[in-house]
Image: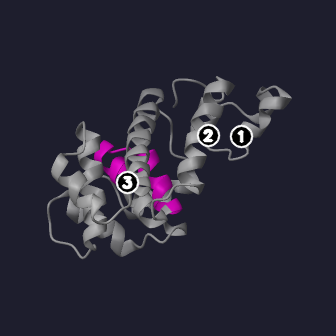
Amino acid sequence: MARLPYLDAADLKPEDQGLLARNINLHRVLVHNPEAARAFGTLGQYIRHHTRLDPRLRELAILQVGWQARSPYEWSHHIKIGYDFGVTDADIEALIADSEGRPNALEPAAKLVLQGTREIYEGAMSAGTFAALRRHLDDAALMDLVVTATFYCAVVRLLATFEIDVEESYMPYLRKYPLPA
């Protein structure tokens, strides 16, 4: 159970009820501070709809953060979302293999995105990985990769701190690809 109660639209002022247009547990906790929820949502919407980074690579980066953090919420949500943006089961299996240092069939750009994201999760992307990514991404897409990875590092920490529960509708994704213990 989350550390703060899940709020519903009826719990909010009329001008804040739109913050729950996507009625997921993360948003239901964020709306305890509507201004913070708006700020959070602005960057999230930019990443989802306006980034210059290829949508499949973006979702692989987000999934990598979820995998690294062992975040059931982030992992399950972005498996579902990833499917909508071109991530395949083969990509997810390859991400898991790549994370474990095993061979996989991902193309070089995707492998570098995952490597760079893992490095950001641990602190900062290395100079070597950054230079290698510049051969695959323009400066705007590279900026968006770093913004995406760092934002989702914050998201998984927020999810963990507030102990936000995975909604039942996302549990099949978690059962299909369980996180390691």
Q: Which residue is mark 2?
A: 42
User: What are the residue bounds of the magenta stretch?
Assistant: 62-81
Please check the rendered image and state whether residue 9 is part of the magenta-colored stretch, yes or no.
Answer: no
Q: Residue at horizontal 29%, vertical 41%? A: 121
- Relative to the observer, which residue lies in front, 47 or 76? 47
Give how far apart the Cα atoms at labels 3 and 1 are. Answer: 31 Å
- Relative to the observer, which residue lies in front, 179 or 111? 111
Q: Is residue 76 above or below residue 5?
A: below
Q: Which mark lies nearer to you, 3 or 2?
A: 3
Q: Which residue is mark 1?
A: 20
- CB within 8 Å, label 3 to label 1: no
How many residues crowd around disc 1 within 10 Å: few (fewer than 14), some, or many (20 or more)? some
Q: Residue at horizontal 77%, vertical 31%? A: 16
Type of amino acid at the residue the image marks with label 3? Leu
Q: Secondary structure at mark 3?
A: helix
- Sequence-wise, the earlier of marks 2 and 1 is 1
Residue 56 at x, y = what percent?
Answer: 44, 66
- Sequence-wise, the earlier of marks 3 and 2 is 2
Q: Which mark lies nearer to you, 2 or 1?
A: 2
Q: Which residue is mark 3?
A: 142
Residue 17 at x, y = what percent?
Answer: 78, 35
How many residues crowd around disc 2 within 10 Å: few (fewer than 14), some, or many (20 or more)? few
Q: How is the image coloured?
A: one colour
Q: Which mark is residue 126?
A: none
Q: Is residue 87 above or below residue 100?
A: below
- Judge whether residue 181 can be spotted in this image: no
